[in-house]
Amino acid sequence: GIQVEQSPPDLILQEGANSTLRCNFSDSVNNLQWFHQNPWGQLINLFYIPSGTKQNGRLSATTVATERYSLLYISSSQTTDSGVYFCAVALRRSGGSNYKLTFGKGTLLTVNP
Amino acid sequence: DTEVTQTPKHLVMGMTNKKSLKCEQHMGHRAMYWYKQKAKKPPELMFVYSYEKLSINESVPSRFSPECPNSSLLNLHLHALQPEDSALYLCASSQGPGQGGHEQYFGPGTRLTVT
């Protein structure tokens, strides 16, 4: 199956700092999503970005599909940004595989005041 | 509205009990999913329903039985579970084949403890 690697596994920041999270994947994809999982377990959709660049407030993401990686940028981090950030992808195939999201192991972000 | 709801939020059950988890969405999505997430691990796919038909079963033990009674509802029936089945169970939905788009939206999850 497809391999998804996220780095770094852990990241500690001071409030106000910027950070970049990386997601590498091993095959062509037609779905790539970034999620933030809060302490209660809710997966919050950040970006649906199989290719290109998107921005939403302090967050932005870029996916370079031809080179099989995606980056999530967090600027001016806040304590509420703490949690686990997951990258998840689905293969570019016909049939059932289109629907199977495979998650990376996540990046645990801690933002200290 | 991009909301997926799940009930109950928490469930404690014994190994001989039968219980059900429920999931509902009103976004007109025709694909619905069950994922299982163990502590400090990423979610893992269990089942996919597409247009109310089971499309993917990721070799899940038969003590987990999914059901899709209509396009808005997804159930997961639980019977004779083991303590190692304790986990967060997440439901998700997305547009189905022919609807365009693949973004999945997740519910808040049911935290299951098997005693």
Image (tube, coloured by chain):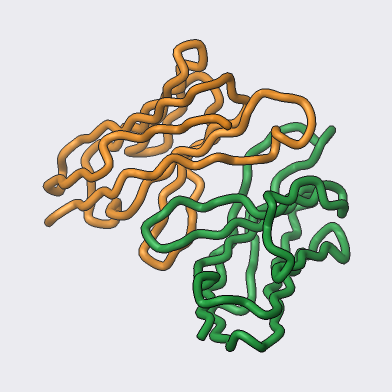
Of residues B95 and B60, the one drawn nearer to the viewer in this rendering = B60
**Where is residue A17 drawn, in percent x and y?**
15, 39
Q: Quadrant of residue B74?
A: bottom right
**Where is residue A94 drawn, in percent x and y?**
77, 26
Which shade is chain A? orange
Q: Quadrant of residue B21?
A: bottom right
* A68 shown above or below A4: above
Quadrant showing the N terminus of chain B: bottom right
Residue that appears at 75% across and 59% down: B26
Q: Is residue A89 left or right of residue A18?
A: right
Residue that appears at 41% across and 67% down: A40
Q: Quadrant of residue B13?
A: bottom right
Task: Please give the letter of the chain rendered in green.
Answer: B
* B23 shown above or below A32: below
Q: How many marks?
A: 0
Residue that appears at 23% across and 35% down: A19
* B51 shown above or below A104: below
Q: Is residue A106 left or right of residue B66?
A: left
**Where is residue A42 drawn, in percent x and y?**
48, 61
**Where is residue B4 drawn, in percent x and y?**
65, 61
Of residues A54 and A37, the one drawn nearer to the viewer in this rendering = A37
Q: Is residue A41 left or right of residue B50?
A: left
Residue that appears at 42% across and 44% down: A86
Q: Is residue B100 left or right of residue A37?
A: right
